[in-house]
């Protein structure tokens, strides 16, 4: 199948083409504003499906809205007519088409041209009125508030919010691309004459800015956002894609002494805390118990033994652990416990606790195993 993509190097085009290739669609005809114009004739002869994503949204002269949106759409459809190519055409319109502004008018004119083309030729047209699209590779400080906020906050640059109560209608790029591929395969989501992306979010500018600022702070606080919320999950992924390339990493505070080290890695309110414990050869750590706090230990390097004793019993239970055979050991409440390095190299243990450490209420009581 030959798939023509106009606007191939744009934000949506780039994401779409990469996912088409992931889906093993290899015959992709890429056309953009810098392409040789003669290629459009060749591609309009070959195409079995057209993703018409090209358009103008921030011209220096408002007249370019008509030439870039309506004019190029007309040119594309005329060439399809010349070659009697009645393949389906998907068009990236905008929710602005409902509004009385130059950009919206140009998109509405292109929509009308496509409907007329379909009536004349019988070709299938799929018109999507896209809301604000966000995700990786969107150009900041151009026409996307989320791209600008993510980029500027990640780079310690100021942002401007004129009205924090303004609500944006948003779609995530991966959800959009999934819908476009469904359209290619004949399974588009319809709403009357128009098609639509089924997963859309409505958020105020203040909600968005607060979330992005929390993402930045999370690296200092060792926290993770609530990724059970789909919008937060997608916005967090978007924010990370705008990190400066020399700032992907961030340091952790290692608590080091003669026994080894203990380093907190991740803290969450609802999923507990993850830490890394390094024990020197022969070192015993622990010898304490908890009322409610519980933990999971996973030795990933070295070898040792984890010992337990219920605090009202003399019986000692031992679990021998090794990085050669990964297994998780649960640490139940009411059992004093310790971990000893039995090897001649450092032993590395991943430790999870069901709650972040609270120095005011540590729920930790010293008692030898």
Image: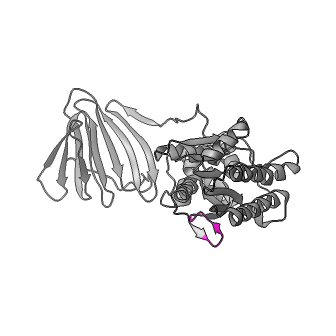
Q: Percent x, y for residue 53?
A: 67, 50
Is 197 covered by the magenta stretch?
yes
Residue in the foreground of this view, choosing between 255 and 44: 44
Give the mark count: 0
Q: Percent x, y for residue 69?
A: 77, 52
Residue 160 visible in image: no
Which residue is found at the position 84% from the left and 65% from the top?
Answer: 100
State whether residue 339 is above or below residue 111: above
Residue 352 visible in image: yes
Q: Percent x, y for residue 105?
A: 82, 61
Which residue is found at the position 27% from the left and 58% from the top?
Answer: 333
The answer to whether residue 229 is left or right of residue 216 is left
Is 115 covered by the magenta stretch?
no
The answer to whether residue 85 is left or right of residue 317 is right
State whether residue 347 is above or below residue 218: above
Q: Percent x, y for residue 93?
A: 71, 58
Residue in the foreground of this view, choosing between 150 and 41: 41
Residue in the foreground of this view, choosing between 229 and 42: 42
Question: Which residues are the magenta region?
Answer: 191-199
Residue in the foreground of this view, choosing between 37 and 110: 37
């Amino acid at each position: 199948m030959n798939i023509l993509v106009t606007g191939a190097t744009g934000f949506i085009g780039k994401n779409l083409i990469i996912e088409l290739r992931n889906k093993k669609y290899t015959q992709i005809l890429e056309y953009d504003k810098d392409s040789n114009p003669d290629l459009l004739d060749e591609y309009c002869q070959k195409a079995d499906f057209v993703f018409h994503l090209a358009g103008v949204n921030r011209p220096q002269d408002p007249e370019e809205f008509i030439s870039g949106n309506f004019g190029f759409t007309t040119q594309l459809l005329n060439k399809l007519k010349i070659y009697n190519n009645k393949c389906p055409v998907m068009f990236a319109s905008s929710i602005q088409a409902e509004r009385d502004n130059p950009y919206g008018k140009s998109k509405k004119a292109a929509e009308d041209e496509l409907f007329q083309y379909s009536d004349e030729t019988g070709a299938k047209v799929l018109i999507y009125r896209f809301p604000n699209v966000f995700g990786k590779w969107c150009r900041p400080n151009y026409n996307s508030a989320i791209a600008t906020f993510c980029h500027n906050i990640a780079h310690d640059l100021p942002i401007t919010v004129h009205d924090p109560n303004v609500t944006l209608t948003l779609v995530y790029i991966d959800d959009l691309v999934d819908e476009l591929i469904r359209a290619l395969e004949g399974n588009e989501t319809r709403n009357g004459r128009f098609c639509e992306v089924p997963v859309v979010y409505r958020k105020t500018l203040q909600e968005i800015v607060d979330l992005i600022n929390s993402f930045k702070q999370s690296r200092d606080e060792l926290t993770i956002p609530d990724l059970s919320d789909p919008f937060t999950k997608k916005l967090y992924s978007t924010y990370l894609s705008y990190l400066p390339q020399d700032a992907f990493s961030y340091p952790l505070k290692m608590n080091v002494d003669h026994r080894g080290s203990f380093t907190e890695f991740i803290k969450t309110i609802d999923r507990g805390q993850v830490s890394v414990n390094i024990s020197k050869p022969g070192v015993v750590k622990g010898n304490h118990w908890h009322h409610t706090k519980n933990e999971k230990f996973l030795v990933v390097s070295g070898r040792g033994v984890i010992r337990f004793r219920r605090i009202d019993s003399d019986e000692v239970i031992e679990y021998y652990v090794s990085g050669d055979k990964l297994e998780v050991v649960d640490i139940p409440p009411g059992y004093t416990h310790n971990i000893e390095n039995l090897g001649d190299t450092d032993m590395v243990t991943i430790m999870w606790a069901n709650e972040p450490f609270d120095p005011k209420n540590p729920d930790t009581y010293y008692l030898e195993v």
